[in-house]
Amino acid sequence: MNTSTLDPVELPAGMAPAEGPAYQWGQRVIALCDLVNDGSFPDVAEGAVLAEVGSEGEIVQVGVHEASQQPVYMVDFDGRVVGCEEPEIMLAMELHDLARQSREVRP
């Protein structure tokens, strides 16, 4: 996919543009846990899974939560944009590298 043709997603209220996040717009990431609705998605039941662990998505915007000053990543998981914190995601490339390395170590 050519990410240069995508328009950034508008940040939700309470978020400001990020300075120095670990990940950048356009990078592919993997969900490291089930990402559940915290009430941000009115058309989805609160507590419902928005993206399952292992789902792959693309970062479409990066911001900082104003209260905590922590980076927040807006990740597009198959058409559903979900706000994620750094511990909830990992670069897909890094996960694929870890899997390759573990296969190489086996006797």
Image (cartoon, grey):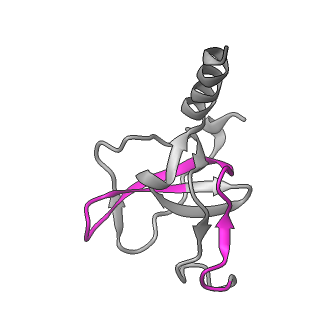
Task: Assess whether residue 105 is covered by the magenta stretch.
Answer: no
Residue sitting nearer the eye, 106 or 20:
106
Q: Which residue appears farthest toward the front when viewing the image?
A: 107
Q: Position of residue 84 (x, y in %)?
A: 49, 59
Q: Residue at x 67, y 50 (%)?
A: 54
Rendering quarter of residue 99: top right
In this rendering, position of residue 40 left or right of residue 42: left
Q: Position of residue 76 (x, y in %)?
A: 64, 55
Q: Position of residue 39 (x, y in %)?
A: 54, 83
Q: Residue at x 52, y 49 (%)?
A: 89
In this rendering, position of residue 67 left or right of residue 27: left
Figure check: 80 above or below 95? below
Q: Which residues are magenta?
A: 45-74
In this rendering, position of residue 24 left or right of residue 31: left
Q: Residue at x 61, y 62 (%)?
A: 81
Figure check: 37 above or below 93? below
Figure check: 1 above or below 59? above
Task: Assess whether residue 56 is covered by the magenta stretch.
Answer: yes
Q: Position of residue 4 (x, y in %)?
A: 61, 36
Quarter of the picture containing the C terminus is top right
Residue sitting nearer the eye, 15 or 105:
105
Quarter of the picture containing the N terminus is top right
Number of numbered discs on residues = 0
Rendering quarter of residue 102: top right
Q: Residue at x 57, y 54 (%)?
A: 75
